[in-house]
Amino acid sequence: MEDTNCLFCKIIAGEIPSSMVYEDELLVAFKDINPKANVHILIVPRKHIADNNAYSASEDAEIAARLFEVAPKIAKEQGIFESGYRLVMNTGKDGRQEIQHLHMHLLGGNLLSV
Ligand code: 5GP
Ligand code: ZN
């Protein structure tokens, strides 16, 4: 399942250190190394899926459901449940996707401008 050249697979395997804030059997979540907001967490499936285009509705439905379930839980733990937050998934070149392993950004703690 692991892609040996993938940075996020290495973080999930514990080969590269990260500040983990959440782990279950499907997902992990850790702090972004270069935060764009006061709170910036990456929620990442353990399974290597390159991006939203590679997501399989039949195989990966549990992962998508879990992402929606876990994001507000982490927002609560991070103290931004009430104040609000953004969930962002970048895809491809024009989407400015830097890491080719599906992930959801959880951003909050201050007003965000796009
Ligand atoms: P993308 O542009 O692919 O949606 O977002 C990738 C994110 O991963 C960026 O916000 C970037 O700061 C973050 N990132 C890149 N390398 C590392 C790393 O080694 N550790 C952590 N925690 N985050 C990283
Ligand atoms: Zn990966």
Image (cartoon, helix red, strand yellow):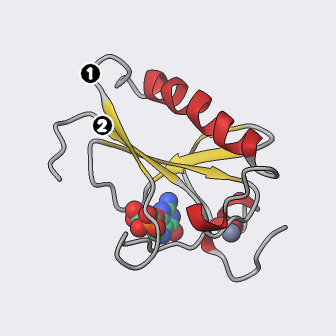
What numbered label is drawn on residue 23? none
Q: How crowded is mark 1: few (under 14 residues within 10 Å), some or many (20 or more)?
A: few
Label 1 belongs to which residue?
83
Residue drawn 32% across the image and 16% down it: 82
Q: In which quarter of the image is residue 21?
A: top right
- Give the quarter of the figure containing the N terminus: bottom right
What is the residue that sits farthest to the front in this orientation?
58
The relative height of residue 48 versus residue 59 in the rendered view (above or below) is: below
Q: Quadrant of residue 36?
A: bottom left
Q: Is 28 displayed left or right of 3 in the figure? A: left
Amino acid type, residue under disc 1 in the picture: Ser
Q: Is the shortest distance between ligand 1 and the CB of mark 2 under 8 Å?
A: no
Residue 69, image x, y percentages: 60, 28
Residue drawn 14% across the image and 48% down it: 113
Q: Are marks 2 and 1 in contact (CB under 8 Å)?
A: yes
Residue drawn 80% across the image and 50% down it: 58
Q: Considering only order in the chain, which callout, 1 or 2, is on the residue closer to the N terminus?
A: 1
Label 2 belongs to which residue?
108
What is the residue that sits farthest to the bottom in this orientation?
5
Q: Is 112 displayed left or right of 91 in the figure? A: left
Residue drawn 44% across the image and 28% down it: 75
Q: Quadrant of residue 23?
A: top right
Identify the secondary structure beneath mark 1. Answer: loop
Q: Residues within 10 Å of mark 2 (few under 14, many from 20)?
A: many
The relative height of residue 43 versus residue 92 in the rendered view (above or below) is: above
In front here: 69 or 94? Answer: 94
